Image: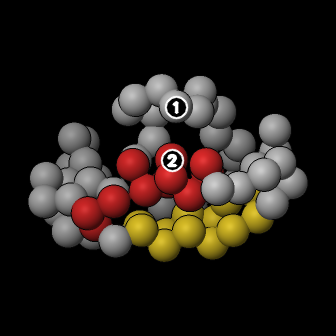
Amino acid sequence: MRTKQPFQFVYGTEWQVVKGLEEAIGMMQEGEKALVILPSDLAFGSEGSSTGIIPAYTSLIFDVEIIK
């Protein structure tokens, strides 16, 4: 699934984004862009997503830009 819509969340609030994405965003500054590739253990791990959309042991790729 690919979207170009901004995703707004409160940094540091548990369960807003997967663990690895939170870590990557924490290393970025406003205006930066990055391609973030997360191994499954930093994403949904052995359980997969709660909705079942992302299977267990799936790596995730995020194209991220910190807007503000």
Kind of residue at disc 1: Gly
Contact check, label 1 and label 2, Cβ < 8 Å = yes
Q: Is residue 67 left or right of residue 51?
A: right
Circle 2 SS class: helix
Looking at the image, residue 25 lies above or below residue 63: above
Circle 1 SS class: loop
Looking at the image, residue 56 lies above or below residue 9: below
User: Counting other residues with Cα less than 10 Å from the Cα at mark 1, is it few (<14), some (14-19), or many (20 or more)?
Assistant: few
Q: Residue at x 71, y 55 (%)?
A: 28
Q: Residue at x 69, y 68 (%)?
A: 34
Q: Residue at x 65, y 33 (%)?
A: 8
Its colouring scheme is secondary structure
Numbered badge on residue 12: 1
Q: As drawn, which residue projects farthest toward the left? A: 46
**Residue 36 horizontal/vertical position (percent):** 56, 68
Kind of residue at disc 2: Glu
Q: Looking at the figure, which quarter contains the C terminus?
A: top right
Residue 35 seen in this snapshot? yes
Numbered badge on residue 22: 2
Q: Is residue 2 left or right of residue 41?
A: right
Q: Quadrant of residue 46?
A: bottom left
Distance in Å between CA atoms under marks 1 and 2: 8 Å
